[in-house]
Image: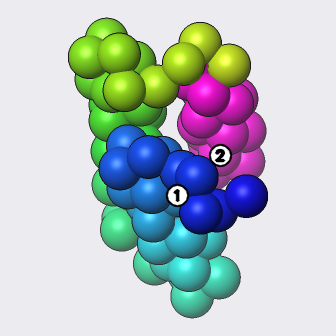
Amino acid sequence: MLFFRNKAQKELDFILEELKNFLSNNYKDAAHSCRKQLGEKAEAYYKEGALSHSQYRKYQQLYAHYTKLMQDYHH
């Protein structure tokens, strides 16, 4: 239900799409930057009350997934 997403969710979903795009094109630095931004923004939006606990947990799980996936991405 993309029509009912709030501004915070739309921004986090956009960051996720950028992250996936950078990973598919092997842009490691940009992908790491997006991953970090995802974690920081999700935390900030949750503290502001823009994300519910379940929404926040979903984005934190995605952040943890990509952190684990990218742990060996170095130059």
Between the residue at mark 1 and the residue at mark 2, the CA separation in whole angstroms equals 14 Å
Q: Around disc 2, counting alpha carbons within 10 Å, would you say few (fewer than 14), some (14 to 19), or many (20 or more)? A: some
Q: Is the magenta stretch mostly helix, strand or loop?
A: helix
Rendered location of residue 43, percent (x, y)? 37, 21
Q: Height in image: 16 above or below 48? A: below
Q: Exactly how many numbered labels are in the figure?
A: 2
What segment is highlighted magenta in the picture? 55-71
Which residue is the site of mark 2?
A: 66
- What's the residue type where badge 2 is placed? Tyr
Rendered location of residue 1, percent (x, y)? 73, 58
- What's the residue type where badge 1 is placed? Asp
The label nearer to you, 1 versus 2, is 1
Q: Does the magenta stretch include residue 22?
A: no
User: Which residue, as the protein is rendered here, is positioned at the far front?
Assistant: 4
Using the image, tell me which numbered label, if any, was put on residue 13: 1
Rendered location of residue 70, percent (x, y)? 62, 50
User: For the point 65% across and 82% down, which residue is it?
Assistant: 24
User: Which quarter of the rendered picture does the C terminus lie within?
Assistant: bottom left
* Circle 1: element type: helix
Residue 36 visible:
no
Q: Height in image: 38 above or below 42? A: below
Q: Does the magenta stretch include residue 57?
A: yes
Rendered location of residue 73, percent (x, y)? 57, 56
Q: Is residue 45 left or right of residue 5?
A: left
- In this view, the residue in front, 67 or 54, is 54
User: For the point 47% across and 72% down, which residue is it?
Assistant: 18
Locate residue 58: give its quadrant: top right
Earlier sequence position, callout 1 versus callout 2:
1
Q: Height in image: 46 above or below 73? A: above
Residue 10 visible:
yes
